[in-house]
């Protein structure tokens, strides 16, 4: 936990879930720059926050917590960001009811007077968010984006300008930058291009030639990434009434492949991204029909799966948290999988060879074997003894 000091006071903030070994704060220089802009810096007038305030993409709830007194609406695609926000509000003595939490799948407010956008890593997610928010923005709306310099590109500014209105940027401060956008109510906008569908290539097992549906912001939304392709070619061949979990499901192509290969199995798709779980549901139903049965959970890894209830977990863990490289998510997923698996149940993991997941799996399960490998990727298997 760290303390963010602003002109409005000090705030104790942490990411969610808290990891003792995690060195990262719940905010960065981009959040600080935006908060100073709202308060009025370099002689500028403070921003009037008495109207409807919407905070989009707040990564760990720092912005929402500082602004809680203005009863903001937070919109995020991240379940973990929502949990972090609630924990940080409680940590600082704020009533959670002062903030309205919406997912990226929920209908935005009808009117927005102040729109604050933390620029996401995915340009596609930003595009979809701006399309969804544009109808609620009016000529008097204050629109400010924020991000680190390496996160804001010409393409970022063009999206704001094409969807909201004329756009300019601030000077860089501590490697952070602000985006100022003036809404143009007369602007003609094309519809959002999301979700996007494409057909998979041949030679990748049960899902060869099948359709994938991707909502905005999903990893490799326009093509099959090479790590998943390698995994699909080395999935376990099983039959019977297995309980299978596609953990960190993304667009659901791995779990859909398992369901196609074993129609008797029950598959659960889990991700912390609301848009990922929506993509997985759409991919599954596009290939197995609307009557096919599966479970789709937005959550913190395996936290909501009953212990000892699963036969097989399939996992392609992320190794980035926004711009930071970390194995914290993978460690959480591996420990959660071990708890959820029955005796004899298996966790199959694909990852970049250099990440060394075999070491963590041996610590967690007491065993790990290499199923397949190439110069870049490995598929690993661990069994709950």
Image: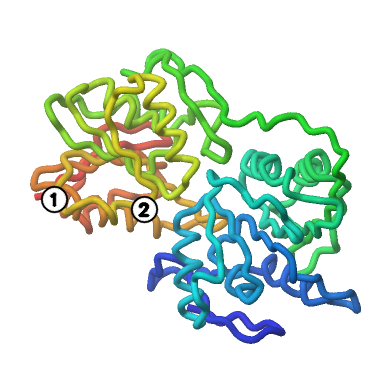
Q: Residue at x 41, y 33 (%)?
A: 280
In percent of width and height, residue 168 lies at 87, 53
Q: Residue furthest front?
A: 110
Q: Position of residue 230 (x, y in %)?
A: 38, 28
Report x, y in % for residue 276: 46, 40
Q: Which residue is mark 1?
A: 308
> Could you say whether the residue bearing mark 2 is in a helix, strand or loop?
helix
10 Å crowding of disc 1: few (<14), some (14-19), many (20+): some
Give whichever of 235, 65 is nearer the camera. 65
Which quadrant of the view contains residue 180?
bottom right
Callout 2 crowding tier (Cα within 10 Å): few <14, some 14–19, many ≥20: many
Residue 359 visible, this orientation: no
Q: Residue at x 64, y 86 (%)?
A: 9
Asked whether, in this view, residue 243 is left or right of residue 105, the answer is left
Decide if residue 232 is on the left or right side of residue 63. Answer: left
| SS at circle 1 | loop
Looking at this view, name the residue that lies furthest to the right: 43
Q: Give residue 254's mark.
A: none
Front residue of 16 and 295: 295
351 or 259: nearer the viewer = 259
Pick whichever of labels 1 and 2 is earlier in the sequence.
1
The residue tagged 2 is 330
In the image, residue 259 lies at what x, y percent? 27, 26
State whether residue 63 is above or below residue 184.
Answer: below
Cα–Cα span, label 1 and label 2:
20 Å
Disc 1 vs disc 2: which is toward the camera?
Answer: 1
């Amino acid at each position: 936990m760290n303390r963010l000091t602003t002109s409005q006071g000090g705030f104790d903030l942490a990411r969610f879930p808290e990891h003792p070994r995690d060195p990262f704060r719940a905010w960065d220089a981009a959040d600080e720059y935006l908060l100073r802009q709202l308060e009025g810096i370099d002689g500028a007038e403070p921003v009037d926050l008495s109207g409807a305030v919407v905070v989009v993409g707040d990564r760990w709830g720092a912005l929402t917590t500082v602004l809680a007194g203005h009863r903001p609406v937070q919109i995020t695609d991240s379940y973990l960001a929502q949990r972090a926000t609630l924990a940080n509000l409680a940590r600082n003595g704020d009533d959670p009811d002062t903030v309205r939490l919406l997912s990226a799948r929920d209908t935005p407010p009808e009117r927005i007077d102040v729109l604050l956008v933390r620029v996401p890593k995915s340009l596609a997610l930003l595009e979809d968010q701006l399309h969804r928010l544009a109808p609620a923005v009016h000529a008097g709306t204050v629109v400010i984006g924020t991000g680190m310099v390496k996160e804001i590109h010409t393409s970022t500014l063009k999206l704001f300008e094409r969807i909201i209105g004329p756009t300019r940027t601030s000077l860089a401060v501590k490697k952070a930058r602000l985006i100022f956008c003036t809404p143009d109510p007369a602007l003609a906008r094309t519809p959002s291009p999301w979700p996007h569908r494409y057909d998979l290539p041949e030679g990748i097992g049960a899902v060869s030639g099948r359709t994938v549906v991707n909502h905005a912001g999903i990893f490799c939304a326009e093509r099959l990434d090479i790590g998943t392709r390698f995994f699909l070619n080395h999935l376990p061949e099983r039959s019977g009434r297995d309980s299978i979990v596609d953990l960190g499901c993304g667009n659901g192509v791995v779990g859909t492949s398992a369901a196609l290969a074993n129609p008797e199995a029950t598959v659960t798709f889990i991700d912390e991204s609301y848009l990922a779980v929506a993509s997985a549901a759409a991919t599954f139903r596009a290939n197995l029909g609307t009557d096919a049965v599966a479970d789709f959970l937005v959550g913190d890894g395996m936290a909501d799966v009953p212990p000892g209830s699963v036969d097989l977990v399939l996992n392609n863990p992320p190794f980035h948290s926004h711009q930071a490289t970390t194995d914290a998510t993978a460690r959480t997923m591996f420990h959660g999988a071990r708890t959820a698996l029955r005796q004899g149940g298996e966790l199959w993991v694909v990852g970049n060879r250099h990440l060394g997941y075999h070491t963590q799996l041996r610590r967690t399960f007491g065993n790990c074997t290499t199923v397949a490998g190439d110069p870049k990727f490995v598929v690993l298997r661990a069994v709950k003894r």
